Amino acid sequence: MTPAYLSLTRSATLRDALAQLERTSAGILLLVTDDGIFERTITDGDLRRLILADNALDKSLTSLPVIHSQVIGADFSRRDALAVMNEAGINHLPVVDPAGRVIEVLDRKDIDEQILLSTPHMGSAERDYVEEAFQTNWIAPLGPNVDAFERELAAIVGSSHAAALSSGTAAIHLGLRLLGVRRGDYVFCSTLTFAASAFPIVYQGAKPVFIDVEATTWNMCPVALKRAFEAAERTGRMPKAVIVVNLYGQSADMDPIMTLCERYGVPILEDAAESLGAKYKGRSSGTFGRLGVFSFNGNKIITTSGGGMLVSDDLSLIEKARFLATQARDPAPHYEHSEVGFNYRMSNILAGVGRGQLKVLEERVAARRKIFETYQRELADNELLEWMPEPSWSFSNRWLTAATLSTDAPLTAAELIQRLAGEMIEARPVWKPMHLQPVFAGCAHFTAGGAPVADRLFSNGICLPSGSNMTGQQIKRVVATLRQLLGKRGA
Ligand SMILES: *Cc1c(COP(=O)(O)O)cnc(C)c1O
């Protein structure tokens, strides 16, 4: 094997140095004192300059100028090391112990790799559909790809109808409008979610009421929901709709939630933005509410770069969605409007990307589940991480591998996320609950009675890199870094 780096002293000859440089893969030599203390690096340029200055090959390196090469201490982070390399314009950086002895030499190409949380992962058919759209000049927010994408997605999830829209947020907004949510109304919504679940409530002039989640699913807690309904009944503030979110690709426990909503006659809008491909008791997530919403944003399990879908078994709702999404144009030879509409339709180009992505959905789900299983298996001996549970009735798409960090851990979840960032690994906190958001200050919030579960999941939660295009090597790096940061033995 080629040694990663070689060191020599000033008594070595120029010829030795040239021969050594041939042997090492690092492209540099380390000049050290007789007791092994690092002095400076030697590049082939340094040796060339010595030769040009008329030094014979059997002369020693004594005339090599004294310079202060950059080094870094052993407790470095990747980000620090790269910053030093960038600053000095170098590609190799010796790591030294407190005595100044070299422990290893960092090579930029080995450490200059950012692992992201979740990135787009294209298949092979997307380009063909997009190409076809170009060739036929269907570049509009309607066309054959839009129609086919709606049909194909509806078939995959087992819903009767679907409307392709410009985003998941647009789909939630239209969904609330279709359910008759208006100014002054109340809408119940899971508190542990991305703000896009709740913002459309405000677009409609309605007021969100946030419902806590349960530890077994991280999703809407039926007991908290029941308490909210009972309070609403007492105060005459019945919600117009309930937004149930399926977090990180896992369905909420729909049966008890649906029973309650049916009892009170309130429709469900299912925010399945994160749970395409997931199942609840064998049936597709997103098909339980009167309306279901999917998102194809860039970080979701499949993507159209931006887009959303509204699904329902009620054709009239989906037809009305398509009408409202194209500026509510009444049938007339001129532009006639009797309602306020939106520009919310998906373009035929992006629908082409979506059709290609649908073909690989199953693979993407399998890949994300495998990533979760790898983390779980490789870190099985680590008692500080508790993985997001998957109840027996659930088939999660494991969009993001999520866990909570024990309060016994040597650092907090926020600190762990920061340290991972230093190692160029993007991890994220669990969504900050909506009832804790400044923008929703003053909104009602219901728990099952005890301490809010969502708050705890937020404080201790962490989402790990989960993209379906992650390499095995990258997962290994995340695992090894976690082990190191959590003070467990090396991988
Ligand atoms: C991504 C997301 C949305 C919004 O979807 P967009 O397509 O980005 O508008 C809504 N709800 C949840 C839970 C999401 O994760």
Image (cartoon, rainbow, N blue to C red):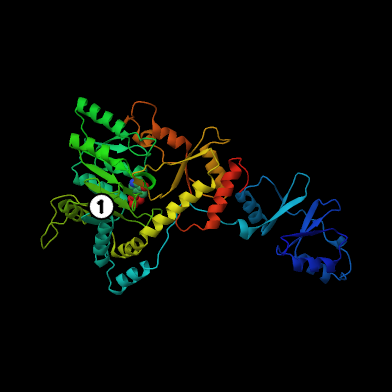
Q: Is residue 114 visible?
A: no
The quarter of the picture where residue 141 lies is bottom left
What residue is shown at x 80% (from left), y 53% (from top)? 39
Q: Pick the quarter of the image with the N terminus.
A: bottom right
What residue is shown at x 58% (from left), y 44% (from top)? 483
| Residue 94 percent across, percent down from the top left | 72, 54
Left or right of 309 in this view: 318: left
| Residue 53 percent across, percent down from the top left | 84, 69
Left or right of 30 in this view: 139: left
What residue is shown at x 28% (from left), y 41% (from top)? 254
Above or below for 219 versus 52:
above
| Residue 230 percent across, percent down from the top left | 23, 27
The quarter of the picture where residue 244 lies is top left
How packed mark 1 is, by other alpha carbons closer than 10 Å (few <14, some 14-19, many 20 or more), is many
Q: Amino acid at mark 1?
A: Leu
State yes or no: Cβ of the residue under disc 1 lies below 8 Å from any atom of ligand 1: no
Mark 1 sits on what residue?
Answer: 310
What residue occupies the far left of the structure in this picture?
332
| Residue 262 percent across, percent down from the top left | 19, 38
Count of all numbered marks drawn on residues in the image: 1
Q: Is residue 135 visible?
A: yes
Left or right of 296 in this view: 231: left
Secondary structure of residue under mark 1 = strand
What residue occupies the far bottom of the structure in this picture?
135
Q: Quick one: 363 or 405, which is closer to the camera?
A: 363
Left or right of 396 in this view: 235: left
